[in-house]
Image (cartoon, rainbow, N blue to C red):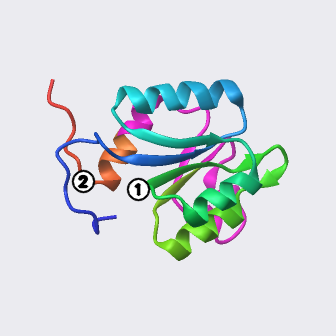
Amino acid sequence: MSEFLPRSDLKGLRILVVEDDALVATVLKDYLQDLEISTVGPIPDIERAMISAKIEKFDFALLDVNLRGTMVYPVAEALNLRGIPFALMTGQDAESLPHPYGGLPSIQKPYAFGHIERYLRTVFNVAPDQV
């Protein structure tokens, strides 16, 4: 994760959001926009997520593990091939995900938005806000 140059803030990042729950997706997109992060999506299905993972330009991806019964792992693999970092979002304990996905970065659902912001700050070497 230290491969990224330090940033002064999260503004200007572009994040792929793959989430099939419309309410969660809308709230997550609004939250990221409040941080001045632009989004690709939210994308609710594996087919469109795969297309975006292969051709869209973005800095990071947030991937809901279970998209209406279809696992998001092929999207994660496509992102790995492109060298794009991501986090899996799951209601399961991360260790319960099948190998090799249990060892990948994950965000536990239900999540607090502050946790997502802290995680992004860590990935992109952005110092915490000074209040």
Q: Which residues are magenta?
A: 89-117
Q: Residue at x 54, y 33 (%)?
A: 111
Judging depth in this view, the residue of 110 and 30 nearest the camera is 30
Is residue 23 shown left or right of residue 61? right
Residue 71 is situated, as x and y percent measured from the top left of the image, at: 77, 56
The secondary structure type at the circle numbered 2 is loop
The secondary structure type at the circle numbered 1 is loop
Residue 80: name its quadrant: bottom right
Q: Residue at x 62, y 70 (%)?
A: 77
Q: Residue at x 71, y 32 (%)?
A: 21
Which numbered disc, 2 or 1, marks the residue that appears first in the sequence?
Answer: 1
User: Which numbered tag is attached to residue 59?
Assistant: 1
127 shown above or below 70: above
Q: Amino acid at mark 2?
A: Asn
Which residue is label 2 attached to? 125
Residue 51: name its quadrant: bottom right
Image quadrant in which the N terminus is located:
bottom left
